[in-house]
Image: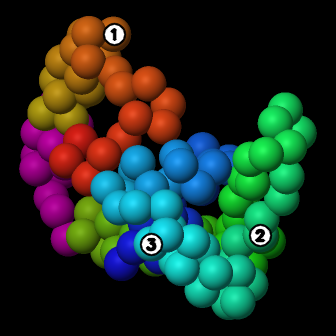
Amino acid sequence: MRQLKVVMVLSMNGSASGQDLAHNLGVGLGTVTGIVDRLVAQGLVSRHEDPHDRRVRRVELTPAGAGLIEEINNAGIKQYRRIMDHLDTETLRTLDHVTRKIRDVADKLAPEQAPAPGDLTPDNG
């Protein structure tokens, strides 16, 4: 699961340092190193030098890692469509109404509570 979380974080952020990943996973840097080593061995991520700070190594998805994310997203969309196909029009209208209300509230709360990039923790993201 931690490997999957790293892949998901990288898909959202583009790249991350080991420290960023450790913070996001709530684990130590040594643990992140092992997780990233396994993902590198699987060809899902690569490491490279940070162009702004040569002391920092950044991790990013490889094309295979991006493909994995695409497969996960497509599977989710396919399942979502299967569910939607079994709902009647009135239920879909109600779902649309509720979804819009939730989005409106989330939009109003976002400026107040939005975590800074890289500040996602296991408890809030």
Report the residue that reaches farthest toward the bottom: 42
Amino acid at the residue labelled 1:
Pro
Residue 80 coordinates in the image, percent (x, y) = 33, 66
Secondary element at tag 3: helix
Residue at 26% of width from left, 18% of height from top? 113
Q: CA distance from mark 1 to mark 3?
A: 33 Å
User: Mark 3 or mark 2, which is nearer the start of the sequence?
Assistant: 3
Q: Which residue is mark 3?
A: 31
Mark 3 neighbour density, 10 Å: few (under 14) some (14–19) many (20 or more): some
Q: Which residue is mark 2?
A: 46
Q: Nearer the viewer, mark 2 or mark 1?
A: 2
Mark 1 neighbour density, 10 Å: few (under 14) some (14–19) many (20 or more): few
The span picked out in magenta is 85-97
In depth, the one of 37 and 110 nearer the eye is 37
In depth, the one of 110 and 30 nearer the eye is 30
Q: Are marks 2 and 1 in contact (CB under 8 Å)?
A: no
Q: Are marks 2 and 3 in contact (CB under 8 Å)?
A: no
User: Mark 3 or mark 1, which is nearer the start of the sequence?
Assistant: 3
Instruction: Tell me which secondary structure the magenta stretch mostly adopts.
Output: helix
Looking at the picture, does residue 78 appear above or below residue 87? below
Q: Answer with left or right where residue 93 lies relative to residue 67.
A: left
Q: CA distance from mark 2 to mark 1?
A: 34 Å
Residue 105 coordinates in the image, percent (x, y) = 18, 18
The answer to whether residue 96 is magenta is yes
Looking at the picture, does residue 52 appear above or below residue 11? above
Secondary element at tag 1: helix
Q: Which residue is mark 1?
A: 111
Residue at 72% of width from left, 59% of height from top? 60
Q: CA distance from mark 2 to mark 3?
A: 17 Å
Q: Nearer the viewer, mark 2 or mark 3?
A: 3
